[in-house]
Amino acid sequence: MLSFRTLSSLALIGGFAALSACQTGTVANSRSVGDAAPTSRAASDYALGVGDQIKITVFGQPELSGQFEVDGAGAISMPLIGQVPVLGETTPSLEQAITGRLADGYLVEPRVSAEVINYRPFYILGEISSPGEYPYASGLSVLNAVASAGGFTYRANKKVVYIKSVEGLDEDAYQLNAQVMVQPGDTIRIGERIF
C-alpha cells in the first residue's frame, strides 16, 4: 500500500507533466529540446531565394548589368537572355549559368559577377516585444534578432529558441545563445516559459 506522501509526490509529478504538455506556443512538428539540443547552426553556402536582390555585373557591358530581384517564380529577368532561374543557386553557380547563356551566341568570353545586395527578411514571433518581419544582415545571431525586435517579454523562455528555415518543414529547437545564427527567410519563435 502506498503512503500518502508517495501518492502526493506522484500527483505532483503528474501535474508538472500535464502542465508541460499544455505549454502555449508549442508546435507539434517541433523537435524536442533535451540535454542534447544543438547549440549552434552550421553555416553553409547561401542559396538564393524569393525576395533576394542581386547585383549582376557583365564586365564591359553596362546595359546588361544591373540590380535584379528574385521574383515569386524564383527567377530574374535579364536583357538578351530573359528569365534566369536562380532559386537555390549560389552566387558562383549563378555567375556560371549567366556566363554560359551569354556565351551562347551573344558575347565572346563574357565575364560575369554576381553578389547579393539585399537578403530576404527573417521573421520573429512569440514572446518578444515587437514580432514581425525584419531585414536580414550578414552574421545575424538569434540574440541580435531578438534585440532588433525589442527584446524578450517577461514571459519568454530564454533558454530555447525554435527556428524554421525556409527550406525546412519542421521547427528545430536550439539552446538560446550567441552561437545560434539566423539565415535569410528563417522564422524564429521564442516560446513561453512555464514558471
Image (cartoon, rainbow, N blue to C red):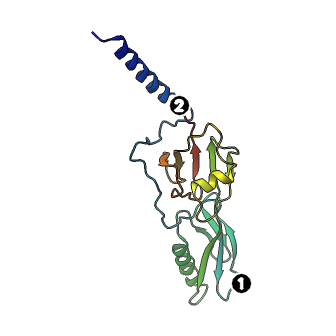
Question: Which quarter of the picture shows residue 192?
Answer: top right
140 or 30: nearer the viewer: 140
23 or 172: nearer the viewer: 23
Single out the mark in the foreground, 2 or 1: 2
**Residue tagged 2:** 23
Q: Is residue 186 above or below residue 14?
A: below
Provide residue 16's location: percent of width, then percent of height: 46, 25
Q: How far apart are marks 2 and 1 (CA)?
A: 57 Å
Provide residue 128's location: percent of width, then percent of height: 65, 43
- Residue at 52% x, 78% y: name it: 96
For label 2, the SS is loop
Q: Is residue 129 above or below residue 45?
A: above
- Three-letter residue code for mark 1: Pro
**Residue tagged 1:** 62
Q: In this view, does 179 lie above or below 76?
A: above
Provide residue 102's location: percent of width, then percent of height: 59, 81
> Left or right: where does residue 16 sit relative to residue 108?
left
